[in-house]
Image (cartoon, rainbow, N blue to C red):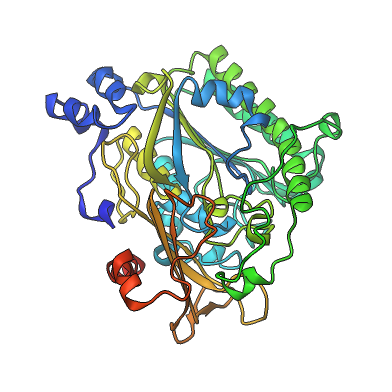
Amino acid sequence: MAENHRPPVSRRGFLGGAAAVAAATAVPGLAQIAAAGPAAAATRPNILLIVTDDQPKHTEWALPKTVAWLADQGVKFTNGHVTTPLCAPSRSSVFSGRHAHNHGVRNNKASHSLDQSTTVQKYLKQAGYRTGLFGKYLNSWTLADNPPHFEEFALLQPGYVDAQWNVDGTVRTINGYTTTIVRNRTLDFLDKAADDPRPWFAYVTPYASHGPRTPEAKYAGTPVPEWNGRPSVPEGDRSDKPAYIKNATGTLADGRRIRAEQLRTLLSVDDAVQAFKDKLQALGQLDNTLVIYIGDNGFSWGDHGWTAKSVPYRQAHEVPFYLSWPAGGLGAGTVDQRIVANIDIAPTILDAAGITPNAPVDGTSLLSAQSRDHLLVEWWKQGTGAGGAPTWSSYVAKDKQYTEYYDLTTDGAGTVSGTGQVKFREYYDLTNDPNQLTNKLYEATPAQEQALGIPALAAGLAADRTA
């Protein structure tokens, strides 16, 4: 992929001269970084990384305060993705900056496959940062096991009310709504900055908006805006889709219910984000805190009959993605249309902190002017049972998407087995068919495939899968 063949641009180097300024003007938002000048690099920023659960795009109604801060006064990435639409693989990509086929966490059972010596929290702690984790960590992680490289933590056993937690090594029940507990624990961590001069890294990850999508009591009956679906909900004719989508049974009513439940849980996240902003302002640390907000994967609201994640369709891997860092020149409100992903988070944080990782990364710093023309998105089926999405990988560009499904499965350790034979393919013209209704490879002739550029896309996808 394009980002793997260009040398990384450090923040200090990027700020260093007129050539960098010229490069910056090509990408919205980067001109502000260049204009900030080398003085901004003198003090390492604090890092606030907020990762929500199963939050798709088009959920901003529930996040007015978050959007007003991080998007309207920071950067909104309009083409934000995750590289595997599943919790543990995606979060491992956030931590490592690598695709799942490189970090090894190919499914939710394989969390212990992540090399903890290559994570952003390891690098930051080693560099003198105070590190904290508040909320969900990795699926299948044993609650009693302390998360490596976090100095302070409240690790949540997923749930919404009266859940089990590992608090700094002690497993216990904490009564109350878990998003509120995540908020308060994070605020306590931030408060310590008044007396501790070290820069800090807070990984904040509420359970919202994951199922069962239990809202905070005060938001349980909150009306949400009416939603009449989109052309892909539920898509009546799926004859050109793979078998598991042909058999999907999700309806518009299902999508409306899931959407409303997700929005209500996110209202509490919005309250928490506003509390973080208020605390940073009170501490005098708002300007020099790099804040990143992303969903760990998207979710389908009945699109193509599907009411989950795990699929190559846009709703599953496109996510909200915001960034703010006023001291780094990213506090004025810009829209960045580059294709960006969760694998870019670790390189961005390390770039801002002036840290060079020892291990290779697949992502690229969002503080540089680098831009990719497409992204590899991948998914592995766990086990050999019937149902669910098969293993697939996809070449995702702004104007097109090409997907292959394979005869491959993984076990609980993430080990892959199978013939690797391509079982089904899809191609969508995203410019003219953004809802992915017409699979142009269905019953296509070799000449039609050639005209679509499929041989080159297949070769590119094969190269991405082994890079």
Residue 136 or residue 300, whichever sits in front: 300
Judge left or right: residue 22 versus residue 320.
left
Q: Which residue is at a point 38% across and 36% down the rendered structure image?
A: 337
- Is residue 394 placed above or below 131 in the rendered structure? below
Q: Is residue 19 left or right of residue 60?
A: left
Q: Is residue 42 visible?
A: no
Q: Nearer the viewer, residue 254 or 444?
A: 444
Q: Give the quadrant of residue 188.
A: top right
Residue 320 location, x and y as percent? Answer: 53, 39
What residue appears at the point 63 percent right and 68 percent down from the top-left corner?
245
Residue 202 percent coordinates (x, y):
53, 35
Which residue is the extreme one toward the bottom?
A: 419
Residue 205: tell me if it is visible. Answer: yes
Q: Which quadrant of the rendered structure holds the N terminus?
A: bottom left
x, y (%) of residue 433?
48, 52
In terms of depth relative to the viewer, which is nearer, 435 or 151?
435
Return the x and y of residue 301 as percentages of the image width and height.
68, 51
Residue in the image at 24% along x and 23% along y:
34
Q: Quadrant of the C terminus?
A: bottom left
Q: How many marks?
A: 0
- Residue 178 to residue 195: above or below: below
Q: In this image, 73 relative to 86: left or right?
A: left
Residue 219, picture quadrant: top right
